[in-house]
Image: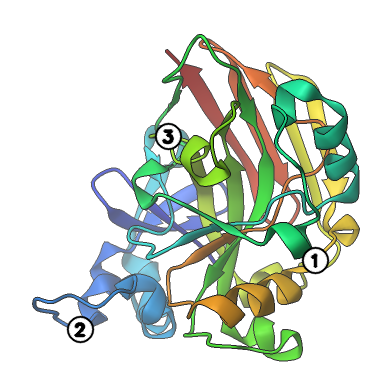
Amino acid sequence: MKICRFNQSRLGVIDQGSVLDVTAALSVLPAESYPYPVIDALIAHLDSVRDEIEQIRHEARKLRLKDVKLLAPVANPGKLVGAPVNYLKHLEEARAQPELHHNNQIEQIQRAGLFLKATSSLIGPGEPVRIRFPDRRSDHEIELAVIIGKTADRVAAKHALDHVAGYTIGLDMTVRGPEERSLRKSVDTYSVLGPWLVTADEFGSPANVDLELKVNGQMRQQANTRDLVLTIPELIEFASRFYTLHPGDVIFGGTPEGVGPVVAGDSIQAKISNIGTMTVNVLA
């Protein structure tokens, strides 16, 4: 199932190029009170919501996809987890280009570890990436993004995919400079998720998935997840060794070689097999 959020946080299902408004299915979510749980309620109760969607989708209002504003498919992630240089060719690229490393030592992911992006940087494809520092280079990075569906604490890789709710396209936008990764990648609008969540059962294995990114129609990045240094299950194992992953947390799987700058006026087209394509505009 392909599940989206659109307009004023309405819930939709993608159906042959249209959006079925199934917001009524959110009625099965439990009522919460302060202090609110540190999870995304939709993702935590996704199975129940899907069951309700099947009951009501025959009477759902159908909208044209081009007429809705797509939001990030996860509204309240507790954590956005990044995986630096998780493709070998990107590691080589980062080490070779001073404008990427700024004299920072670029370590392999097993030594560098993971990093966190501020949740305030999150947007969906219906909003533009806004260049906050026009005097500095900002780069695109396409990544397979994994949405955690069940609490994961020190999970072994062989069981890791049991904790996944679904997958989406991630853009880990980055402003270049000498500061720590998590600061430069936490700029407002620099974490893009979309266009929708594809549930794990429909998506299938994340081990052999094509990724490509174009800017203004020109190919910049093209790769396959079989070239990951740490696979998606290994990333979940790695992350959950250090902190518990909760429903709604997102892991950006790492970007391949070909990262490059974008400027105001550019249009980014990101495509991942089994998910689809999202277009994101870049503004000043």
Describe residue 103's horizontal placement relative to residue 250 as left or right: right
User: Mark 1 or mark 2, which is nearer to you?
Assistant: 1
Q: Which residue is mark 1?
A: 230
Q: What amino acid type should be assigned to the residue bearing mark 3?
A: Val
Real-space Cα distance between discs 1 and 3?
A: 26 Å
**Residue 164's quadrant in the figure?**
bottom right
Q: Are marks 1 and 3 in contact (CB under 8 Å)?
A: no
Q: Which mark is residue 187?
A: 3
Residue closer to the observer: 151 or 61? 151
What residue is shown with label 2? Answer: 30
Q: Residue at x 81, y 57 (%)?
A: 209
Residue 97 in the image: state x and y as whole percent. Answer: 82, 25
How packed mark 3 is, by other alpha carbons closer than 10 Å (few <14, some 14-19, many 20 or more), is: many
Judging from the image, what secondary structure is the residue with disc 1 in? loop
Q: How far across and how far down the image is residue 37, in percent?
A: 24, 78
N-terminal of the two: label 1 or label 2?
Answer: 2
Q: Contact, CB < 8 Å: mark 3 with mark 2?
A: no
